[in-house]
């Protein structure tokens, strides 16, 4: 029986990929970068480079700050100082934040699952995760938010899931992990005996709203 929910944040409750695409296009326009790439190419390049660097971050091959700098440098083929790159990334973050949006069905999911204890489990940097949730009004619905800054582990490390289960006081078999990333969310949770629901916004019946039928 499901008695608690673990939820990923980005691209599960929030359209983070859309916000990133809009953010990097705004940065490009502001600084006249990568003029030879069309919007779709640049958005895909930013996303794929980011995902590769996040995997390196998970493996401890780069630091949080290094992956940010490398993402800007590799996306736009820039040879600039760290200070200049950091300034560009700060500009990107400002653009990105202007495009934060919850999915249209997030509010109904939150309302109809309110009878269950819920926790956000995200690989996002803690200050940014809380800023994002506050901006979108999600913080009042999720008092428990677990990031790598809280427990020293990033998904798919099982420790971040175990830490969250302990906070909620629930056994793995009574929890449901809801997330969009098979490698980071679904497979590690399943290996711990946690029930899972894979969110895939490209497929009918696979949004967070569709989880309600299982509760």
Image (cartoon, grey):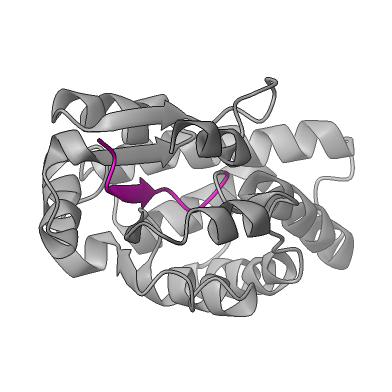
Q: Residue at x 20, y 45 (%)?
A: 60
In this view, 159 is above or below 93: above
Question: Where's the C terminus, which quadrant?
Answer: top left
- Left or right: 167 with respect to 54? left
Q: Position of residue 131 (x, y in %)?
A: 52, 78
Residue nearest the viewer, comparing 161 with 73: 161
In this view, 106 is above or below 139: above
Question: Where's the N terminus, which quadrant?
Answer: top left
Residue 4 on the magenta span: yes
Q: Position of residue 62 (x, y in %)?
A: 29, 49
- Left or right: 15 with respect to 54? right
Q: Position of residue 166 (x, y in %)?
A: 10, 58
Q: Which residues are magenta?
A: 1-11
Residue extending farthest to the top is 203
Using the rendered view, name the quadrant where residue 112 is placed.
Answer: bottom right
In this view, 46 is above or below 193: below
Using the rendered view, name the quadrant where residue 29 is placed.
Answer: bottom right
Is residue 82 in sight in this rendering? Answer: yes
Q: Residue at x 70, y 51 (%)?
A: 103
Q: Residue at x 24, y 60 (%)?
A: 148
Residue 88 on the magenta span: no
Predominant SS of the magenta segment? loop
Is residue 77 in sight in this rendering? Answer: no
Q: Total of numbered circles in the picture?
A: 0
């Amino acid at each position: 029986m499901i008695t608690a929910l673990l939820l990923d944040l980005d691209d599960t409750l929030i359209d983070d990929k859309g916000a990133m695409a809009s953010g990097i296009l705004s940065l490009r326009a502001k600084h006249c970068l990568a003029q030879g790439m069309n919007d779709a190419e640049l958005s895909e390049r930013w996303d794929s480079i980011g995902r590769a660097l996040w995997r390196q971050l998970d493996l401890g091959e780069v630091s949080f700050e290094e992956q940010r700098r490398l993402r800007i440098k590799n996306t736009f083929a820039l040879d600039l100082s760290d200070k200049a790159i950091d300034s560009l990334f700060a500009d990107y973050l400002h653009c990105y934040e202007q495009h934060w949006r919850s999915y249209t069905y997030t509010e109904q999911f939150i309302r109809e699952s309110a009878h269950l204890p819920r926790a956000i489990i995200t690989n996002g940097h803690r200050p940014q995760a809380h800023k994002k949730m506050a901006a979108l009004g999600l913080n009042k619905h999720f008092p428990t938010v677990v990031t790598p800054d809280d427990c020293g582990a990033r998904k798919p490390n099982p420790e971040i899931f175990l830490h969250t289960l302990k906070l909620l006081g629930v056994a793995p078999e009574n929890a449901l992990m809801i997330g969009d990333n098979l490698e980071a969310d679904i497979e590690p949770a399943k290996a711990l005996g946690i029930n899972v629901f894979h969110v895939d916004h490209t497929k009918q019946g696979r949004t967070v709203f569709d989880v309600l039928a299982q509760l």
